[in-house]
């Protein structure tokens, strides 16, 4: 079971790019990396998923180095509404329930 | 719109009572999950189910029970054996396409349970 480590909190200002890194040293060959966003009193929302190299969608980019022992979620030009908790999840998903959520990173965007 | 519906949004339980939290999905997802979240903490897995009439314990199953009689429904019962049930409960679902989930989990909006 891949254990993940993220910073507990990060601060940023509106308009800046934010990079949140997740360490997963014991990631397995079949594991994917998925990032979620959670606002207070809501369920987490899927942001992006990747296996290796770089993945980009309309809201974020995910960078995964060749050794896959870490990953970086990049949020371009954050706004106040991006203030939330961000979770990195690693798992092969072939056996449902074998992925573990860590405590996440609380991102606070200031004006 | 397809999604996951959790009810009720808020639930109050007296000491010694069992309560059942509802979770329904119309996404045709194979797998369903229950998580518990305490203030300022991450999500901890209670139970999960990959197929109808089958489910497995997660990391903190003691004091909880589930059933999966229909693909769309995965109710969670918090029993009197759960000593500290006050928490935010989240239900999720996922596709199991070819044995792998695609696009991760879809979560409901949660049920906040308080013991009074």
Image (spheres, rainbow, N blue to C red):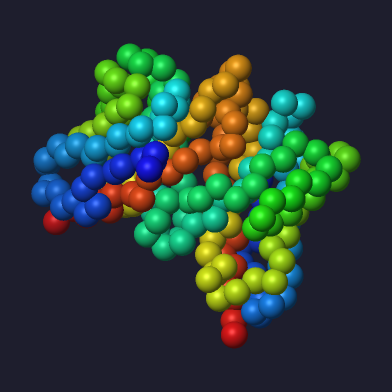
Quarter of the image where one finds residue A64: top right
Side of A1 where B29 appears, left or right: left
Q: Residue furthest right?
A: A66
Front in this rendered view, residue B27 or A12:
B27
Q: Residue furthest top?
A: B53
Q: Quadrant of the N terminus of chain B?
A: top left
Residue A82 visible somewhere in the drawing: yes
Rendered residue at 24%/37% (across/down) = B22
Rendered residue at 39%/39% (across/down) = B2
Front in this rendered view, residue A73 or B37:
A73
Residue B9 lies, in percent from the top left, at: 25, 52
Q: Quadrant of the C terminus of chain B?
A: bottom left
Residue B84 visible somewhere in the drawing: no
Rendered residue at 20%/37% (across/down) = B20
Image vertical order of residue B53 relative to residue A42, above or below = above
Side of A111 where B85 appears, left or right: left
Residue A48 lies, in percent from the top left, at: 65, 47
Image vertical order of residue B50 relative to residue A101, above or below = above
Residue B96 lies, in percent from the top left, at: 53, 23
Q: Residue furthest bottom?
A: A111
Instruction: Give the mark count.
Output: 0
Rendered residue at 42%/51% (across/down) = A43
Image vertical order of residue A85 relative to residue A66, above or below = below
């Amino acid at each position: 079971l891949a254990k993940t480590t993220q910073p507990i909190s990060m601060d940023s200002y509106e308009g800046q790019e934010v990079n949140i890194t997740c360490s997963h040293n014991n990631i397995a060959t079949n594991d994917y990396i998925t990032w979620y966003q959670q606002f207070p009193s809501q369920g987490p929302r899927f942001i992006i998923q990747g296996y290796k190299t770089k993945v980009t969608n309309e809201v974020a980019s995910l960078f995964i180095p060749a050794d896959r022992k870490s990953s970086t979620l990049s949020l371009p030009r954050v706004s106040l509404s991006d203030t939330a908790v961000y979770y990195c999840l690693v798992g092969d998903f072939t056996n449902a329930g074998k992925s573990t959520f860590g405590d996440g990173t609380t991102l606070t965007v200031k004006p | 719109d397809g999604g996951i519906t959790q009810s009720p949004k808020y639930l109050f339980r007296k000491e010694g009572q069992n309560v059942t939290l509802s979770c329904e999905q119309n996404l045709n997802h194979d797998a369903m999950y229950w998580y518990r979240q305490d203030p300022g903490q991450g999500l901890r897995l209670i139970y999960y189910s990959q197929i109808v009439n089958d489910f497995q314990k997660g990391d903190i199953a003691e004091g909880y029970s589930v059933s999966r009689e229909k693909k769309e429904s995965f109710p969670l019962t918090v029993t009197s054996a759960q000593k500290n049930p006050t928490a935010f409960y989240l239900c999720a679902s996922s596709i199991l396409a070819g044995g792998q989930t695609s696009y991760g989990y879809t979560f409901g909006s949660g049920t906040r349970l308080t013991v009074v």
